Image (cartoon, coloured by chain):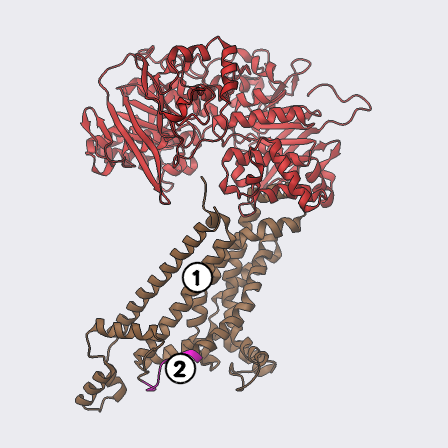
Chain colours: A brown, B red
């Protein structure tokens, strides 16, 4: 008993995450090689001479054997060197980090809005199982999650930004504005994400809560004569929300990297848009680094969720004696 | 029913249930699950509700603290707890009633406790609710756990439920239930999920707490012997009604309702032996809940029923001052005819003690199995030498964790034994896994599992399930397959109309018949039965045991029969093998092993079984828990719990060999046979002394 099994579990989990990251980097690298067109030609255009293209290829190092290229790319990454963008002829990192920061801000606002809403909605629906509130929450959640972001986004822009004029139409605050202003600018783009994720999170929270409510231990607690509020707080919620944590974590990847449409609609310079442009421009270093960064974010999020799950769940934390 | 009505001025009985109806709303219609149930439990009395699954016992129990399922409600009648009508209470009053007057303990202790809160906190909640400050609540929790004989309360309080064994958890739940000193303690199958040895301990505990505390008990069980041991008054439930009621001893001694008579006859007793006497069964099925029948609900299954029974619903006849029976012909109930009077089918030799062949069908030599669990080596089987002879039944007994199922799986090749283990079928060596065995060898060995629900594919019909086995194992097709299919289906006493059904449409007993039919499809030489009747009601169990005995008589198949129920094992087995921590402690002819002198572990297993006559002879009890097989005790692995451990220290230091003490009877114990005979025999005083010394 004690902390040892926990430490061993976490160590194993981190090692696994690193291994996943290495495999991911190899896959991304190979995918970049499979894409058609060579970088020199892509940069110099169709009218450049063959020798100029070869010279550029040599300068970029893309004529070396693949393992060598991978090695220099991967070791570069470890030193924080993500390569030079073909398109902008400038270090990838100078574009990637600001874009990542923007995306994280947007995701954070969406998270802060959707997690409490979804969890509270789901728990409420479970407590009123079969009642009007349950049906309203379940049906609304399900319908909203089927509306694509660009549809809800446009409707929201028209409604709140153009008709009511209560929120700005773009996601970009004027430079130098404080955090509150920045958040105000991010609310409108975050809402479509909230609408999509709400149904999903609420459904998981509802299912977990219902399972706990029907369990024998909640019966024990109720028949002990504990007040209902205490039964719910102490005996239901902790067990019911454990699975929800994992679900929330798996949505992180989508929230960080999958927001091309929203970022485009609100003209927001996030990492989704950056990667999308890099792909259309065949800007491989930018593309590879961008995808890898999203992979890292995703892995970190699931790792954190696993750790949280473990810490909250004594069965995993302490192991069994039986 | 228990005693007379309270004298004027006396306090109200602990529980008074009168004319209770409970119905469940299913697809818009109300279905009556409990009908006109009345009983009274006086203060400090104990009342038992007994009956097969689905008869409404638990529903009745849950109605007392008003915890019915969402679609259930009390549709008529009243429940009075300490004189207070439960149905009239508002939410706050109901909460107070639950906190102070009634407590419940139910079947699976592992699920009754919150998995993510430490045990101590969960017990302390009860005291905190009564207004005790937190620190004192924890102290009192420790005392409460001590009262249920938990050896190290502080350690248990710091544990999470998953770190404790089932017996320990049930003690915790009982301690928690008693913490508020309720007027009524409801125990719903409290020991059903536990091993017989642990069950015995928990029952002892409940019995001794009853002496100490002033709590009335409602005890619910499907196990007649457990009820007989624990209760003063008994109500027998069938299809939502109490069909017979009275003092336990009288009721079980001279039952006055055909259902009670039938139930008692289903239980394999000492006088029953396969091949000599069949077990009686109750034909037919429990009516579906809500099915409204004119007349007596038991009439369709009753061999005493006549015209009157199908028309006129019997009232609760007052059979004597203390007893009631809902049967028009309660005087004739004891003369209920047997299900099939033909005791043993013709052409089958009634075999006496096993005298069979000396060439083993299956030989296991030095069979061991080590599992690696979290970097620890767990020795599930250790050096087992055992043979199965043609046409015999070898009963395999032991507590959970003793290695019974592992041995079964090794035998049929589902688990590969450690290197050096030798398995032989008819003198030919068997490969460690089924995949590498010859088709012929695989066909020769089949297995029937405990739970037919998970063993049968839900999506396939009975025809498909058995037919596929015939194709795969017997290589039959077309006409021949069809003929054999019908033959097998009839031999397990099913009918053609069952063929298109899927498992979900069958009752538990029928499902197990399908599993047996499938196992017999390839005409096996050996059938491994791993607790085949444990999930079934006694009347269904009796039918399955009869079936297995018949099939063996007809086909000469050999059984390796695993069960925790010694009565069942005794009925079917020619020889018995006893396992403890993966070691063979004793094996020999069934009668010899049961009659003794036996290994102290066998002795403990036998004395843990509650018997129906309520006369529990001399009991020896196993203290503590079964040790971890990852870290078995030194010397004799049983010494930590052995009540007959030698004072010399030999048991702690040296593992005794498995010695043949009589022809065909081997025991692994340092105590020589004559000494065991003396200890376990008539010389009871010596046994007591030795027992006390061993503690």
**SS under mark 2:** helix
Name the subunit of mark 2: A
Q: Earlier in the sequence, mark 2 or mark 1?
A: 2
Q: Which mark is residue A95?
A: 2
Q: Residue at x 34, y 29 (%)?
A: B516
Give the x, y percent position of residue B213: 68, 27
Quarter of the rendering containing residue B1:
top right
Residue B356 x/y as whole percent: 27, 14
Q: CA distance from mark 2 to mark 1?
A: 26 Å
Q: Which residues are magenta?
A: A87-98
Is residue B237 within the magenta segment? no
| Mark 2 closeness class: few <14, some 14–19, many ≥20 residues within 10 Å | some
Residue B131, given in percent of the width and then of the height, sits at 72, 44
Q: Which mark is residue A302?
A: 1
Which residue of the protein is positioned furthest toward the top in this rendering? B682
Label 1 crowding class (10 Å Cα cut-off): few <14, some 14-19, many 20+? many
Seen in the image, is B667 located left or right of residue B332? Answer: left
Lateral position of residue B409 relative to residue B678, left or right? left
Q: Nearer the viewer, residue B593 or B442?
A: B593
């Amino acid at each position: 008993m004690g902390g040892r099994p926990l430490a061993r579990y976490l160590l194993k989990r981190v090692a696994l995450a690193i291994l996943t990251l290495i495999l991911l980097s190899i896959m991304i690298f190979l995918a970049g090689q499979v894409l058609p067109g060579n970088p020199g030609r892509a940069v110099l255009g169709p009218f450049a001479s063959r020798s100029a293209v070869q010279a550029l290829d040599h300068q970029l190092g893309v004529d070396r054997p693949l393992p060598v290229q991978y090695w220099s790319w991967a070791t570069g990454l470890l030193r924080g060197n993500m390569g030079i963008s073909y398109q902008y002829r400038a270090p990838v990192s100078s574009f990637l980090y600001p874009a990542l920061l923007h995306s994280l801000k947007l995701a954070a606002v969406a998270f802060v809005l959707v997690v409490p809403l979804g969890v509270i909605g789901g728990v409420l629906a479970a407590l009123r199982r079969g009642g009007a509130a349950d049906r309203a929450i379940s049906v609304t959640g399900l319908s909203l999650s089927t509306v694509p972001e660009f549809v809800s986004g446009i409707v929201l822009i028209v409604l709140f930004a153009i008709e009511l004029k209560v929120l700005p139409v773009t996601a970009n605050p004027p430079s130098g504005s404080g955090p509150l202003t920045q958040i105000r600018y991010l609310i409108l783009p975050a809402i479509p994400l909230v609408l999509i994720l709400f149904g999903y999170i609420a459904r998981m929270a509802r299912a977990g809560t219902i399972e706990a409510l029907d369990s024998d231990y909640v019966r024990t607690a109720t028949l002990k004569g504990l007040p209902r509020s205490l039964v719910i707080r102490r005996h239901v919620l902790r067990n019911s929300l454990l699975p929800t944590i994992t679900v929330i974590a798996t949505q992180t990847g989508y929230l960080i990297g999958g927001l091309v449409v929203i970022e485009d609609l609100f003209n927001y310079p996030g990492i989704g848009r950056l990667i999308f442009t890099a792909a259309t421009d065949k800007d491989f270093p930018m593309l590879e680094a961008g995808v890898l960064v999203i992979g890292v974010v995703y892995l970190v999020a699931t790792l954190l969720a696993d750790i949280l799950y473990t810490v909250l769940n004594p069965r995993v934390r302490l192991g069994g004696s039986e | 029913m228990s005693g007379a009505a309270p004298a004027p001025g006396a306090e109200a009985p602990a529980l008074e249930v009168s004319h209770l109806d409970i119905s469940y709303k299913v697809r818009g219609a109300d279905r009556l699950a409990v009908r006109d149930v009345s009983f009274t439990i006086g203060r400090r009395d104990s009342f038992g509700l007994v009956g097969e699954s689905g008869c409404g016992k638990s529903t009745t129990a849950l109605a007392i603290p008003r915890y019915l399922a969402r679609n259930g409600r009390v549709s008529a009648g009243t429940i009075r707890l300490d004189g207070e009508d439960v149905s009239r209470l508002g939410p706050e009053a109901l909460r107070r009633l639950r906190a102070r007057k009634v407590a419940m303990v139910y079947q699976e202790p592992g699920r009754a406790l919150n998995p993510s809160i430490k045990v101590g906190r969960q017990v302390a909640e009860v005291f905190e609710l009564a207004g005790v400050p937190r620190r004192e609540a924890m102290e009192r929790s420790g005392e409460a756990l001590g009262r249920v004989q938990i050896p190290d309360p502080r350690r248990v309080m710091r544990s999470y439920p998953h770190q404790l064994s089932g017996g320990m958890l049930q003690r915790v739940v009982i301690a928690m239930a008693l913490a508020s000193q309720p007027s009524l303690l409801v125990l719903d199958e409290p020991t059903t999920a536990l091993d017989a040895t642990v069950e015995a301990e928990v029952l002892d505990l409940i019995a001794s707490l009853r002496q100490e505390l002033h709590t009335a008990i409602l005890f619910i069980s499907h196990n007649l012997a457990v009820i007989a041991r624990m209760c003063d008054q008994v109500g027998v439930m069938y299809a939502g009604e109490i069909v017979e009621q009275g003092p336990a001893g009288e009721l079980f001694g001279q039952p006055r309702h055909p259902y009670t008579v039938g139930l008692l006859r289903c239980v394999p007793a000492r006088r029953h032996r396969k091949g000599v006497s069949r077990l009686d069964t109750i034909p037919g099925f429990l009516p579906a809940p809500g099915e409204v029948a004119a007349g007596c609900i038991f009439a369709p299954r009753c061999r005493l029923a006549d015209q009157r029974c199908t028309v006129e619903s019997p009232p609760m006849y007052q059979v004597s001052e203390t007893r009631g029976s809902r049967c028009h012909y309660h005087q004739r109930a004891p003369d209920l005819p047997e299900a099939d009077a033909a005791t043993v089918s013709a052409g089958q030799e009634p075999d006496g003690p096993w005298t069979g062949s000396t060439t083993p069908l299956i030989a296991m030599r030095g069979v061991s199995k080590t599992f690696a669990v979290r970097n620890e080596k767990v020795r599930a089987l250790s050096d087992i030498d055992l043979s199965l002879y043609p046409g015999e039944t070898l009963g395999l007994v032991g507590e959970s964790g003793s290695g019974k199922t592992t041995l079964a799986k090794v035998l049929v090749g589902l688990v590969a034994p450690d290197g050096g283990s030798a398995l032989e079928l008819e003198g030919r060596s068997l490969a460690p896994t089924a995949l590498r065995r010859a088709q012929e060898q695989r066909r020769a060995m089949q297995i029937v599992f405990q739970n037919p629900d998970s063993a049968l594919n839900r999506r396939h019909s009975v025809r498909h399930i058995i037919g596929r086995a015939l194709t795969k194992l017997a290589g039959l097709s077309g006409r021949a397959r069809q003929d054999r299919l019908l033959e097998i289906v009839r031999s397990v006493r099913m009918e053609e109309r069952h063929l298109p059904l899927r498992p979900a449409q069958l009752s538990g007993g029928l499902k197990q018949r399908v599993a047996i039919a499938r196992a017999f499809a390839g005409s096996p030489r050996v059938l491994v039965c791993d607790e085949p009747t444990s999930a079934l009601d006694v009347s269904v169990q009796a039918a399955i045991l009869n079936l297995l005995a018949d099939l063996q008589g007809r086909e000469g198949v050999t059984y390796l029969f695993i069960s925790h129920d010694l009565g069942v094992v005794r009925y079917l087995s020619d020889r018995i093998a006893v396992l403890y921590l993966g070691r063979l402690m004793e094996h020999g002819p069934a009668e010899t092993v049961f009659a003794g002198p036996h290994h102290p572990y066998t002795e403990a297993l036998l004395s843990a079984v509650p018997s129906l006559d309520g006369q529990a002879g001399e009991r020896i009890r196993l203290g503590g828990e079964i040790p971890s097989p990852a870290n078995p005790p030194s010397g004799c692995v049983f010494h930590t719990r052995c009540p007959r451990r030698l004072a010399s220290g030999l048991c702690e230091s040296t593992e005794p060999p498995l010695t043949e003490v009589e022809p065909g009877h081997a025991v692994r114990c340092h105590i020589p046979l004559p000494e065991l005979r003396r200890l376990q025999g008539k010389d009871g005083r010596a046994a007591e002394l030795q027992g006390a010394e061993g503690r």
